[in-house]
Image (cartoon, helix red, strand yellow):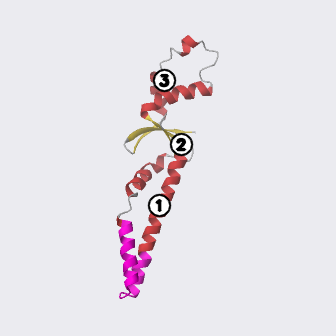
Amino acid sequence: MNRLNGSDLLDELDELRDEYTDLKETLGYATIDVAEDPDNEEYREIEKDAREALNTWDSLDRMQMLKDIECYITRYSLLIDDLYINEYVEESCLSSGEVPDELPWYIKDSIDWKQVASYVSMDYTEIEFDGTTYYIVSN
């Protein structure tokens, strides 16, 4: 089942923000050093490397995607891929006791889980993330 954990996504966003801030700070300090001593080749090389590192940082798009969904998720959220929502709802209903264990197999096997999922998923927030539609389930 394709699931994403809100806590993992928020931790990743924090790490990317820290990394980006570090890159910007390094460039800022290097720029100050060059401004104070423009003839120092070492400072100019550090500034050039810092600028290049910031310009070629390949996680900017990922960080933006995470920032776009940040307001929808919490550390306790579960994001369920829409292709797997039927299986998630079935598993959730069976494990939570919403469908009694005593129910005969021929009734359990006759449940239209697609229809149940369509009803249940109306209570979930639907978002696009990384090219996939997810339902957000808050636990």
Residue 98 placement: quadrant? top right
> Is 74 placed above or below 56 here?
above
How dense is the environment of label 1, judged by Cα within 10 Å: few (below 14), some, or many (20 and up)?
A: some
Q: Secondary structure at mark 3?
A: helix
Decide if residue 29 is on the left or right side of residue 38: right
Q: Secondary structure at mark 1?
A: helix
Residue 114 placement: quadrant? top left
Q: Which residues are magenta?
A: 28-54
What amino acid is found at the position of numbered circle 3 in the picture? Val
Residue furthest to the right: 102
Q: Locate residue 105, reporting x and y percent.
A: 57, 13
Q: Locate residue 71, reporting x and y percent.
A: 47, 49
How dense is the environment of label 3, judged by Cα within 10 Å: few (below 14), some, or many (20 and up)?
A: some
Quadrant containing the C terminus is top right
Q: Which residue is mark 1?
A: 17
What amino acid is found at the position of numbered circle 2 in the picture? Ser
Q: Which mark is residue 116?
A: 3
Q: Locate residue 134, reporting x and y percent.
A: 44, 38
Q: Nearer the N terminus, badge 2 or badge 3?
A: 2
